């Protein structure tokens, strides 16, 4: 698989066990107090913004964008199977308001650890938004993807609810249709994620 970081300044990004270093690891706090609808005590969850996510240790949104573009080209050219999946913790901000930022941060770590335990070494996991993770399953067709989603859902819901009962875990996934692209599959996966988040709780 082509390195999604190819051509980048080595001083800016050095992969280590497919996890890049980000200097001291310092950055804007994940959970910061902010004003939402006039509430000075409201909590806003800031998204990650670099190659890696310092909070969970998985890849970040910049890595994901580069990876998706590279894999889109590979899948289109060689017609190889692949699946894109998104996982989001619903109610994370409410959890932070009620129980504090430490509990919300722990829920994200637990979710990340659980998902990391479900994917293969050839797959990729990134935190791409405040409460959202993205997964690329390489060489994975629709049948294998369904099996992964079912297994990952059970394991992740169980792990997260042990530390944070107030949050829900939603999944959205898609594989390219015949003649379709990975970018189109990612868009469909996001729509499925939004539909699940908008639906009744699975808990």
Image (tube, rainbow, N blue to C red):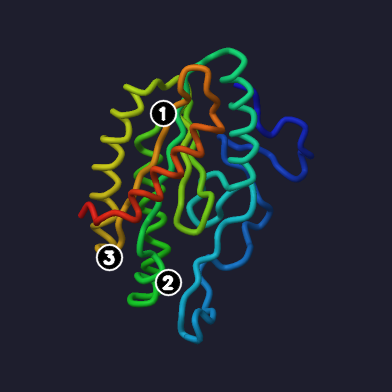
Above or below residue 16? Residue 105 is: below
Dot 2 or dot 1: first in sequence order is 2
Q: CA distance from mark 2 to mark 3?
A: 14 Å
> Residue 142: x and y, percent?
36, 23
| Mark 2 crowd level (few <14, some 14–19, many ≥20, 10 Å Cα) | many
Whether residues under marks 2 and 3 lie with C-beta atoms below 8 angstroms apart, the answer is no
User: Judging from the image, what secondary structure is the residue with disc 1 in?
Assistant: loop
Task: Please state, as top left, top right, bottom left or bottom right, where the C terminus lies in the image.
Answer: bottom left
Query: Label 3: few (<14), some or many (≥20) within 10 Å?
Result: some
Residue denoted by label 3: 166
Is 46 on the left-hand or right-hand side of 167? Answer: right
The tag on residue 16 is none
Label 2: state its secondary structure: helix
Q: Nearer the viewer, mark 3 or mark 1?
A: 3
Q: In the image, what residue occupies the spot 23% across and 57% down?
A: 162
Q: Residue 150's x, y, as percent?
A: 26, 35
Q: In the visual, does 23 lie left or right of 178?
A: right
Residue shown at the point (68%, 53%) measured from the top left: 23
Q: CA distance from mark 3 to mark 1?
A: 29 Å
Residue under numbered circle 2: 101
Sequence-first tag of 3 and 1: 1
Image position, residue 119 (x, y; %): 39, 33
Q: Which residue is tagged 1?
A: 120
Residue sitting nearer the eye, 63 or 88: 88
The residue sitting at 57% across, 35% down in the picture is 18
């Amino acid at each position: 698989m082509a390195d999604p970081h190819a051509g980048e300044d080595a001083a800016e990004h050095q992969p280590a066990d497919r996890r890049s270093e980000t200097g001291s690891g310092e950055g804007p706090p994940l959970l910061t107090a902010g004003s939402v609808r006039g509430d000075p005590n409201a909590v806003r969850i800031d998204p990650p913004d670099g190659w890696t996510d310092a909070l969970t240790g998985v890849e970040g949104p910049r890595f994901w964008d580069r990876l998706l573009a590279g894999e889109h080209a590979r899948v289109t050219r060689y017609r190889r199977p692949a699946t894109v999946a998104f996982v989001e913790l619903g109610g994370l901000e409410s959890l932070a308001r009620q129980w504090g930022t430490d509990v919300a941060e722990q829920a994200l770590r637990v979710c990340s650890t659980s998902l990391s335990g479900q994917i293969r070494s050839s797959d990729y996991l990134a935190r791409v938004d405040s409460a959202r993770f993205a997964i690329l399953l390489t060489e994975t067709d629709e049948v294998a993807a369904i099996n992964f989603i079912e297994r990952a859902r059970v394991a992740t819901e169980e792990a997260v609810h042990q530390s944070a009962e107030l949050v829900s875990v939603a999944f959205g996934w898609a594989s390219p249709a015949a003649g379709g692209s990975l970018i189109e599959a990612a868009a469909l996966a996001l729509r499925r994620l939004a539909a699940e988040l908008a639906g009744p709780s699975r808990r």
